[in-house]
Image (cartoon, rainbow, N blue to C red):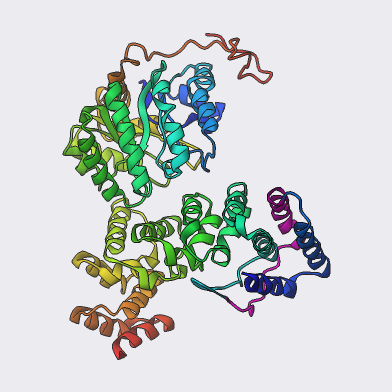
Amino acid sequence: MKYFDSHIHMLARTTDDYENMAAAGIVGLVEPAFWLGQPRTQPGTFVDYFDSLVGWERFRASQFGIKHYCTIGLNPKESNDIPLAEAVMKLIPRYCEKDGVVAVGEIGYDDISDSEERFFAEQLQIAKDMNLPALVHTPHRDKKRGTERTIALVREVGIPEELVLIDHLNEVTLPLVLETNCWRGHSVYPSTKMSEERMVALLKQYGLEKMVVNSAADWGKSDPLKVPKTGHAMKAAGFSDDDIEKVLFYNPINYYAQSGKISVEEVAPVKIDQTQLFEENSVLRGQEPVVD
Amino acid sequence: MSDYFSTLLGAIDQVATSEQQQWLKETLANLEDSQDLDSDLLLFITRARRFVGHSLLDSNADAISTAVGDLQLQSWEAGNAARVALLLKALLLQPARQEAIVTNAYRMGDESEKTALIAGIALYADDDRYKGLALDSGRTNSLILFQALATNNPYPPAYYSEAEFNQLVLKSLFMGVNTEHILGLTNRVNKELSRMCEDYYDERVAAQRSVPADIWLSITPYASEHGFEIMTKALSDEDREHRYYAAMAANRYRPQSADLNSTIKSRLDQENDEHINKLLSSFLNN
């Protein structure tokens, strides 16, 4: 069984996680640009961060057999620092042109403020103009209202709904997105967001079409193996292997494939060669290099 | 502001050792002589907690009456109070550069430094010019920084818009910060906030997760029919905290309802908790 994690923040994870993910069958992932845990204060730190997503992190993943893609965007929290946000917005179109950047994201609302809405709309417009998918984060608080406003803004900007994946959905917000042609993302966490059991219940109730599951693992209490664990829960609940691969491999790749920069055929396990260097840096710290 | 400064120094002196007091006195003098106030202020703020210490200000320390409301000092550490005193001193030395000094001190501060400055924001902000910094501090994942903003702080209820205040309350519930300590909640609660909290309740129940007991303080005043139903049920919840806060909310906001009256009357016969009984009796007697 092979898996694809559509939303995971590997910058915050260790090489143990990469090894465990590869061993569990994860062959590819998408790492969205996001909030680092405390605010950035300079546009330059965004440049360095975006560079690491398309550079070092992609290399680091390959050293453990995983294909790494990313999304680029200004996250909602940092949209409230308007001078900074305006400077970062100028960077986004160029980074979105780069290889392996499969969507604009993760964008959306956090406090549902006016400035968040401004930059959310501008980034939806960028995605529309560049014919790229848009990965949308629904807020942790006032989630239902945030999801309603997200759908309204998607329609107002006029980006094709099929290009939009609305993520972090739950029992209350999924029905709202099912009324649209947007893709339906769910993040499975140890103690917050969704659980495997609740995810299985939603899949049984609403079917598999455009349903996407991810771990959204980051610097907080999260688990980068939640996608394969959801697969096991689906199996235990009676879903077929085809159903499991549909939700946990084909759906996310087909969603991002609308960018033209990823395909099912391309997402095969990477041959590991730990003798390789990235800008003269190695992931090794004294170990023997693994070479497939 | 000079009155606030003097009161703060007095409160620090009550709990600081003679060495700690001496350090602060000398450092304030160094600030007066500084050739680079911004840099020195940052350095002294960083040092203050280490050199003035962690003793809590006296529980009998007077609240400082600010333009936006009373600021209680009892939960403040002496070192953090010293940080605020240093900032006030800098502002008194260069009043024309107040905004630049405050913004720089906040932006360059680490978590604990920002926490001290935000806790004392009412001492240097008598209008909304620093609301941006307050809102910025509220976006944090740091519990101590968020608590410093949200609880026992007269600034947000004075200057936040309805939407901003509502997000502050909702985030408090989200982070497990007791909304009973949000100053001005009773006056600022509104229909939209009640709606947001009802939605949050439903989301938590759908996820089979616990609901923060103090949510009733925000649901009750403008509860929908559904909100009223769940609040009334909370009066009989097996969790004592839910019963307590539902009773507190009923007593505080006094929603008019014959059903509520009869529910509370029958609860009085069954409730064992003395504090809850007092609240229920108070509701019925007024």
Residue appearing at x 67%, y 64% in the figure: B85
Q: Which residues are magenta?
A: B37-64
Please tell me whether residue A93 is drawn above or below residue B214 in the rendered image: above
Residue A290 part of the magenta-drawn span: no
Q: Residue A277: which quarter of the image?
A: top right
Residue visible at 60% across and 49% down in the picture = B104
Report whether A141 appears left or right of A46: left
Q: Nearer the viewer, residue B278 or B38?
A: B38
Residue A41 located left or right of residue B255: right
For residue A48, say whether it is visible: yes
The N terminus of chain B: image quadrant: bottom right
Task: Pick the quarter of the image with the C terminus of chain B.
Answer: bottom left
Q: Is residue B215 above or below residue A159?
A: below
Residue A8 placement, left or right of A138: right
- In the image, residue A234 above or below residue B196: above
Relative image position of residue A162 (x, y in whole percent):
22, 28
How many numbered badges does the structure rendering display?
A: 0
